[in-house]
Image (spheres, rainbow, N blue to C red):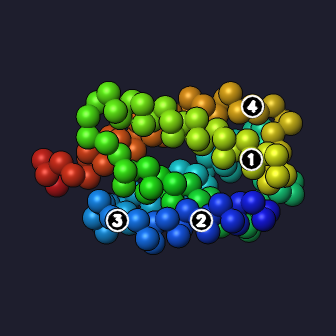
Amino acid sequence: MTYIVIATLISLAIIAFMPKRLKLQEIYVTWGILAAVAINSDLFLGEILDLYDFGASGLQGYDLLVDALFPPALGIIYLNYLPDSGKKIRRYMLLWTLGSIGIEGLAVFFGFEHIAKGWSLFYSAPIYFLVFAFLNWHLRFLRNRDYR
């Protein structure tokens, strides 16, 4: 539990002090979408399919709080520093995918996440990559005036 609290506080501090390239509306909309996706995917994969647990078995209030804070914070940091060119974006996505696997691996190591029920960090890699691809599209969608 301590690991995820520290990781969440660090990510929130980074957001507080980083030079913002994102507009407040982009942060607001992205935060809400990522919190909803994180909560729903963890409820589906963790509770309904029972592939992993966070902390104690069963749904805990702090699981929802972590899902509402930590993944969105990482997504905001990701988007804030997203490069402009295609080749750099692919490298950036790959680095963030590897970093996300590392963060999840530390969550397992420190006992916050228990994946012995059929999940593997290898399953997370394509999911993280797809999330970052979605975030790239999401930011383009928000910034494209033709959609408004």
Q: What whole-number distance in Å separates the C-alpha atoms at marks 3 and 1? A: 28 Å
Q: Position of residue 18 (x, y in %)?
A: 40, 65
- Residue positioned most to the left: 146
Q: What whole-number distance in Å separates the C-alpha atoms at marks 1 and 2? A: 15 Å
For mark 3, what is the residue? 19
The residue sitting at 59% across, 59% down in the picture is: 70
- What amino acid is found at the position of numbered circle 1 in the picture? Leu
The one of 67 and 18 positioned closer to us in this rendering: 18
Dot 3 or dot 2, earlier in sequence = 2
For mark 4, what is the residue? 120
- What amino acid is found at the position of numbered circle 4 in the picture? Ser
Dot 3 or dot 4, earlier in sequence = 3
For mark 2, what is the residue? 10
Picture disc at residue 106: 1
Q: Are marks 2 and 4 in contact (CB under 8 Å)?
A: no
The tally of labels here is 4
Q: What whole-number distance in Å separates the C-alpha atoms at marks 3 and 4? A: 35 Å
User: In the structure shown, which secondary structural element does the residue marked by tag 2 occupy?
Assistant: helix
Mark 3, other Cα within 10 Å: few <14 / some 14–19 / many ≥20: few
Q: What whole-number distance in Å separates the C-alpha atoms at marks 2 and 4? A: 26 Å
The residue sitting at 43% across, 57% down in the picture is: 76
The residue sitting at 29% across, 30% down in the picture is: 86
Q: Can residue 36 be seen here? A: no
Q: Quadrant of the N terminus?
A: bottom right
